[in-house]
Every structure is written in structure tokens, then in C-alpha cells.
Image (cartoon, helix red, strand yellow):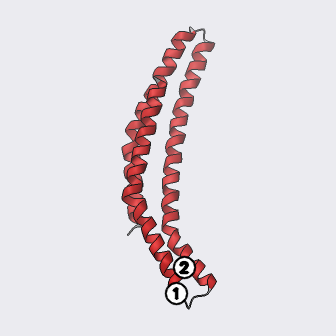
Amino acid sequence: MAEAAQGRVQAAVESAVQELERERIRGLQGTMFRCSARCCEDSTASMQQVQRCIERCHAPLAQAQAIVTAELESFQDRLSRCTLHCNDKAKDALDAGTAETKVRGQLDACLAACGDDHVRLVPAMAKKMKDSLGALQQ
């Protein structure tokens, strides 16, 4: 049961990230490459000027990648805390003398609930990332 929940979370996050990449990141990448190409076409610029120009072109994409990474790390941290809580509850139940088969069932149910709760959080996380990336493109 816990594996199924993990699969649902992973599929939901992958789907959201793929959509984000198609709708927002690719546009930023295209803009960055076109901008960088213009930098290289400036035959009067020094090597350092071209390098600084390319770095300026890359900045919005780097910001976008940082936003996505931070959101995904935050999501993963929340999910990890939830699973740690389930593990702690299971350990406490075992320490209190609860039968191992019962504890295993409780642990699976707790982990499945964590997964289901976090699948429901994915749309809000995706919207937050889209809004943040949309602000970069303006």
C-alpha cells in the first residue's frame, strides 16, 4: 500500500514538473539562447563583455531553476517529515508491545495517508511555481 502511494506522489510531481517545463521553462531557455547568440554576434565587444552579456542572459533561467528546486526540496522535506512521523508511531507501538503485524498495517496506512495528502498538495505547489516563473518572464 505504501509503495502505491509513493508511486502516486512521484507520478503527480513528475507530471507537474513536465507541464511546468513545457509551459514556462522552455520559453526561458529559448529566450536565454537567443539572447546569448546576440551577445556573441557583437564583434566589437571584448571577451569579458561577451561573457558578462551571456551571464546576464542566463540569470532568469538560473532563477527559475532555483525556484523549482527550492519548491521541490520543500515538498520533499514535508513528505519526509510525514513518513518519519509514521515510522516513529510504528516504533512507539512496537515498544508498547503491539503485535508486529498490526503495527505493519498501521504503518502502511499512515504512509498511504502521507502519500495521499501530498498528492493533494501538488496542484498548489505547481501553481505557486508557475506564478513565480511567470513573474520572471515579465
Give above or below for 47 relative to 82. Answer: below
Label 1 Cα crowd, 10 Å radius (few <14 / some 14-19 / many 20+)? few
Give above or below for 9 relative to 32. Answer: above
The C terminus lies in quadrant: bottom left
Q: Tell me where residue 13 appears, x and y as whole percent.
A: 43, 43
The amino acid type of the residue labelled 1 equals: Asp
Residue 12's quadrant in the figure?
A: top left
The amino acid type of the residue labelled 2 equals: Cys
Q: Tell me where residue 46 appears, x and y as whole percent.
A: 61, 87
Question: For numbered disc 2, what is the local secondary structure?
Answer: helix
Name the residue beneath numbered marker 2: 53
The N terminus lies in quadrant: top left
Q: Nearer the viewer, mark 2 or mark 1?
A: 1
Q: Residue at x 42, y 61 (%)?
A: 26
Q: Tell me where residue 119 appears, x and y as whole percent.
A: 40, 37
Name the residue beneath numbered marker 1: 42
Give above or below for 76 relative to 62. Answer: above
Label 2 Cα crowd, 10 Å radius (few <14 / some 14-19 / many 20+)? some
Q: Earlier in the sequence, mark 2 or mark 1?
A: 1
Along the viewing direction, whichever of 43 and 114 lies nearer the viewer: 43
Q: Residue at x 47, y 76 (%)?
A: 35
Q: Position of 73 compared to 137: left or right? A: right
Q: Residue at x 53, y 75 (%)?
A: 56
Q: Position of 97 compared to 20: left or right? A: right
